[in-house]
Image (cartoon, grey):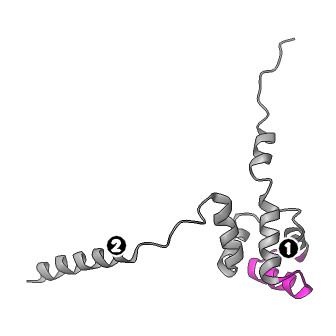
């Protein structure tokens, strides 16, 4: 029998996102608490079942993509936690001066075109 040379990718995948459920749970509890009303509110925001929300708050599971988007839309703590996990929490907001310069250039082009 030949030896198997396959890599176990599932173990590597589990290590990458291991902190994800806990980070989301901490963010949600920090901002909203863990009361019954919080569970109902999160279920309304996301459309997830109350049991699923309890798993999020307990750090058992993390929210899936659509649920994560809904949570980030309503919760700045979840949004910040997501950015922190991706290493982009320190990114600055878009440069306002660059936006103003682009708008000025657009106005110059539009006024030159109208003449």
Residue 6 occupies which quadrant of the picture? top right
Q: Earlier in the sequence, mark 2 or mark 1?
A: 1
- Residue for point 66% across, 71% down: 80
- Residue for point 87% across, 11% down: 1
- Image coordinates of residue 76 in percent, x first then y, are 67, 78
Q: Is residue 86 visible?
A: yes
Tell me if mark 1 has few (under 14), some (14-19) or many (20+) residues whose alpha carbon lies within 10 angstroms of its own: many
Most common secondary structure along the magenta stretch: helix
Tell me if mark 2 has few (under 14), some (14-19) or many (20+) residues whose alpha carbon lies within 10 angstroms of its own: few
Residue 110 occupies which quadrant of the picture? bottom left
Q: Which mark is residue 41?
A: none
Q: Is residue 69 visible?
A: no
Query: Vertically, is 33 above or below 52?
Result: below
Q: How many marks?
A: 2
- Image coordinates of residue 16 in percent, x first then y, are 74, 49
Q: Is residue 86 left or right of residue 36?
A: left
Residue 111 occupies which quadrant of the picture? bottom left
Q: Quadrant of the C terminus?
A: bottom left
Point out the residue furthest to the left here: 115
- Residue for point 90% across, 84% down: 35
Viewer-closest of 109 and 34: 34
Can residue 83 be found in the magenta stretch?
A: no
Disc 2 designates what residue? 98
Q: Is residue 44 left or right of residue 59?
A: left
Viewer-closest of 43 and 89: 89
- Residue for point 78% across, 77% down: 47
**What whole-number distance in Å separates the C-alpha atoms at marks 2 and 1?**
41 Å
The segment highlighted magenta reads 33-50
- Image coordinates of residue 28 in percent, x first then y, are 79, 76
Point out the residue furthest to the top here: 1
Disc 1 designates what residue? 53
């Amino acid at each position: 029998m030949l030896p198997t040379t396959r890599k176990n990718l599932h173990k590597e995948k589990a290590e990458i996102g291991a902190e994800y459920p806990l980070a989301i749970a901490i963010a949600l509890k920090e901002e909203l608490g863990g009361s019954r009303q919080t569970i109902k509110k999160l279920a309304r925001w996301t459309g997830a079942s109350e049991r699923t929300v309890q798993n999020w708050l307990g750090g058992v599971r993390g929210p899936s993509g659509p649920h994560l988007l809904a949570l980030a839309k309503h919760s700045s703590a979840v949004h910040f936690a997501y950015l922190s996990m991706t290493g982009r929490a320190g990114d600055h907001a878009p440069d306002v001066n660059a936006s103003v310069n682009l708008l000025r250039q657009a106005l110059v082009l539009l006024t030159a075109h109208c003449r």
